[in-house]
Image (spheres, grey):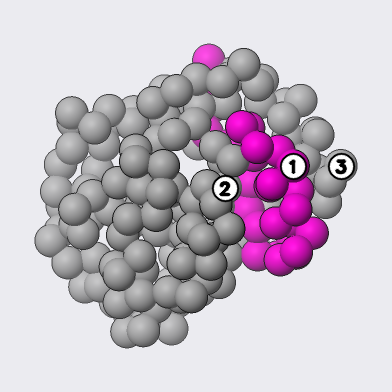
Amino acid sequence: MIELIPAIDIIDGKCVRLSQGDYNTQKVYNENPVEVAKEFEAHGIHRLHVVDLDGAASHHVVNYRVLDQIASRTSLVIDFGGGIKTDEDLIIAFDNGAQMVTLGSVAVKKPELFKKWLTQYGNEKIILGADVKDNKISINGWKEESRQELMPFLKDYTKEGVFKVLCTDISRD
């Protein structure tokens, strides 16, 4: 079975599209993310990936109110990513309606914290973000390239129990 999981990227509370993660290419495609989420739901979609691009850039969750609005006005199962760097950020995401979180930067920069959350919340709620450019994992809203190569990164974390991965080839996005 194939499950389509659309994504909504948020900057300043609005749905945006970036080209290859370049914030200078920002195009607003809808001022109201709740409206977009409801449209997805009306078309039979059950899951939604919400990305807080402001959060990714500023290293802490920013658009949690948008998450709360989508969660409270739809029945979509939401995974949320962008800016989750601390226990407080993670709690904010879950308290505002995320059923799962996608974590990339923290998996690269703070692997022990990622593993702690994986153990604490379980591999059903923790999704490994593995956004890649030129075979290297990119972090912090695709603004920074790590030294981590994709396949060893994935293998290391699958050994830790990760079985949900969200991987984007930045050069094709």
Q: Which residues are drawn in magenta?
A: 107-134
For disc 2, the marked residue is: 103
- Neighbour class for label 1 at 10 Å: few (<14), some, many (≥20)? few
Residue drawn at 30 percent across, 70 percent down: 65
The answer to whether residue 66 is left or right of residue 153 is left
Front one among 3 and 54? 54
Question: In this view of the protein, can residue 6 be seen by the observer?
Answer: no
Secondary structure under the numbered disc 1 in the rendered image: helix
Disc 1 to disc 2, how far (Cα)?
A: 13 Å
Q: Residues within 10 Å of mark 3 (few under 14, many from 20)?
A: few
| Residue shown at 21% from the left, 59% from the top | 13
Would you identify the image quadrant in which residue 27 lies? Answer: top left
Near-viewer residue (24 or 171): 24
Which amino acid lies under the numbered mark 1 shown in the image of this protein? Glu
Which mark is in front, 1 or 3? 1
Q: Secondary structure at mark 3?
A: helix
Report the amino acid beneath label 3.
Lys
Q: Amino acid at mark 2?
A: Leu
Q: Which residue is mark 3?
A: 159
Is 113 magenta? The answer is yes
The x and y percentages for residue 153 are 72, 30
Image quadrant in which you'd find residue 104: top right
Quadrant placement of the C terminus: top left
Residue 57 position (above or below residue 2): above
| Disc 1: which residue | 112
